[in-house]
Image (cartoon, rainbow, N blue to C red):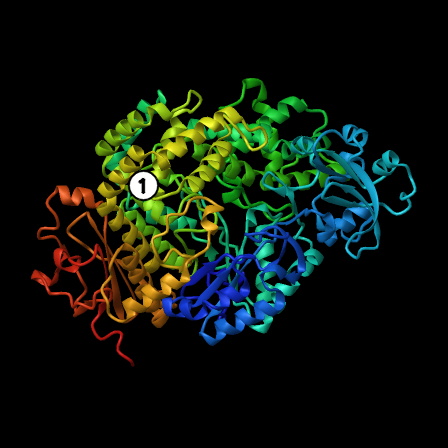
Amino acid sequence: MPGGAAPHRPAAGRVVPTATYRLQVQPAFTFGAAAEQADYLAALGVSHAYLSPILAPAPGSTHGYDVVSHEFLNEEAGGAEGFDLLAAALRQAGLGTVVDVVPNHMTTPTPASLNHPWWFLLREGRDSDHAHWFDVDWDAEDGRVLVPVLGQSLEAVLAADELSVEAGGGPHGDETVLRYYDHVFPVRSGTESLDLADLVAAQHYRLCDWREGGSWLNYRRFFDVTTLVAVRVEDPDVFHHTHRLLLEEFGAGTIDGFRIDHPDGLADPAGYLARLADATGDAWVVAEKILEGHEQLPDDWRCAGTTGYDTLLRVQQVFVDPEGEAPLTDLLAELVGERQELDELVLAAKEQVVAQVQEAEVNRLMRLLAKIVPDEDQASLRRGLGALLVAMDRYRAYLVPGQPDDHDQLQVLAHAEARAATHVAEADQDAVGIVSLLAEGTPLDELDEAAEAAHREFMVRFQQTCGPVMAKGIEDTAFYRYARLTGLNEVGGDPGHLGLDPTELHAFASRQLASWPTTMTTLSTHDTKRSEDVRARLSVLAELPGEWAAWVRATRDLAARHRGSRLDPATEYLLLQTAVGAWPVDNDRLQAYATKAVREAKQHTTWTDPDSDYEADVATFVAALTTEPALVEQVGRWVDRAAPAARETLLGQKLLQLVLPGVPDVYQGTELVDLSLVDPDNRRPVDYATRRQRLTRLDAGEPASDLDDEKLLVTSRTLRLRRDHPEWFTGEDATYAAVPTSSAHALALGRGDASGTQVVAVMTRLGERLRADGGWGAAGLDLPEGAWEDLLTGRPVPPGPSGSAQLSEVLAALPVALLVRHGSLDPK
């Protein structure tokens, strides 16, 4: 992997996991609680526990991405002592640890003193020893930081006597502080004796109404979350202080690898990964990079690959029936009253995000443009800038000021410029061109030193803004508006297209093995909009579009008296799909999901300006869907009808993920059927006692009693096979090959090494059409020569005519099979 050589692998001697198991560490599931599951994870077959961020977060954090200190481990999860206990338990069980790292941001906590660098910045301003930690546009606020936390204007807050000066505050309890309810801020030295209004005005920060932050915030943040302030990890000193503790744990052997959160937010992702690789000797590191379409991970990134959304997309789509596209499109048009085009919805959503959600970021870019090209029409430049941000078809380009041009990355901007030009008036065409040239690093005229500095900053800031526009515009807005087949509305997903031909899957897998053989693969994460098994259920809609349409019409008739005048058809349809995907789902869970969904959609209500009447109609409908007997029975009927195909897809996509090139991750609890929705629903407690009992029964030879058992069987047997024979999956001589079948409903692939194919995985796809055609019949599987047995059932594979095996025999017990060459598992 050093120097970007292909294939990208960790350095020789560095640990490569065979599989990981994601654990969400939090106060309700501590390091100690995780340690209690070490033997279970080992029995399941993974090689590494993969932990959510372990550094100190805001009090009560259930996710850990709101770091307050890089000096300590999460005390509410057990601190250093608890982590040492976990590391020891994992080592004793033969397991290692992978840890999630958050290099892009910290939280601005309440009280602010919990984040010492942030506190010192607020107290001492741009002269603080920690001023270089944070991405602040000091000039925008005359040398101050905007702090938008007030419930009304500062003048109104002062008049209401809501601010007070107190002693005994700060990190060490010895400072004079300014209090606003639970918020506590430092007081600048020498201003303690001023009257309150003058004291407030004399600080290095400006308190303001929280609404003002949306337009004029002058520090970079994570997406639109004002309480997550961006960190300048590109500064070597900041990198050192924010990574010291994690690297010490790595050096001590308690951490084997890292997952990097949101690298696209960084000024120079490749530079960051190179610095981390140097610090770890090229350890196994995966980056949370969302690849769009056929986008490839930059070849100069010194990492093992992505966190797996690229694989998730292909695995899901290969089990979706493309013949369902037209009837599902017609049904959506019937319900919403018009034919919706996803591209148009995405365009409108991204334009809304640029104008509203990312207004502060656009304003900052405009301040830079005013310094670079002050004589240009600034209003036109703003329209051109907005159009270019909207026209980006990926999370960002990768261009670094002062480094040689990258032709491929310049083409990304060139294509975006061409698209942007079609969405602006003729009078703004030149503005689009100017912004594009500046974004790629081409100066228009000779610039003075200040303008050159602004140009370099603009290049970086523009790229950092593209990601939030993509994420908030598509995943967090358009995907909540477009309800044709909501299971495809996923991180890195492509709901505009239904189905993937197996040949495309095999081509993708072969490329991964050649270039990124130890990348991570996944089906569920803490960020997915729905669990893998909810999506499996929803994929069946494309196999039964006619029956589904009839069910939807009948259900809408049953629910008519519960449908308020404000409930829109698109939201109703989203909720119907969510119900059948997550069923049985109780009222509280579906209500929480519905509230998040409609606010993220930003059409009828929002987080910042909720419409209580609209949300009341949504809540009434959800309550009826989950409690009205006739509707409950109706939802259950569909779930039962779709169950056979859902079972095939659920088991098929799990097996496929586990055998494809890369290192598979199992998100906590998903070794059984998991019907979780978007966070925080997917952070609910996991019942490990039940999982242990089921695994013990299966290991004792008892047959699988239900779909939970079947999924656990597939997961555990495949993980153990990978653990026992990593050379077939992630070894330097590992191979991948499509295995021919005579039926389009069987997907088969082989894994092995230089000695030949040792494993063949077989999965049923599009089973409803298979049954409609009369079943497998004489369809066969062209197994490589030799004797084979199914690791899931223990049965040998009967030889068929001409060396092929009959699919009806191979898949008689389960819709999937994990075949191993007879004798290949014998002790050597």
Image quadrant in which you'd find residue 586? top left
Between 558 and 151, the residue placed more toward the observer is 558
* x and y, in percent, of residue 136 in the image: 72, 42
Residue ID at (74%, 53%): 117
Tell me: 736 left or right of 111: left
Which amino acid does the dot numbered 1 rest on?
Answer: Leu
Q: Which residue was labeled with disc 1? A: 538
Look at the image and tell me in which quarter the C terminus lies. Answer: bottom left
Residue ID at (53%, 63%): 2
* x and y, in percent, of residue 644 in the image: 22, 47
* x and y, in percent, of residue 192 in the image: 89, 44
708 in relation to 39, above or below: above
537 in relation to 568, above or below: below
Between 261 and 2, the residue placed more toward the observer is 261
Residue ID at (39%, 59%): 662
Disc tally is 1
Q: Residues within 10 Å of mark 1 (few under 14, many from 20)?
A: many
Tell me: 562 left or right of 331: right
Between 307 and 416, the residue placed more toward the observer is 307
Between 485 and 361, the residue placed more toward the observer is 485
Residue ID at (82%, 40%): 164
* x and y, in percent, of residue 408 in the image: 49, 44
Q: Is residue 126 visible?
A: no
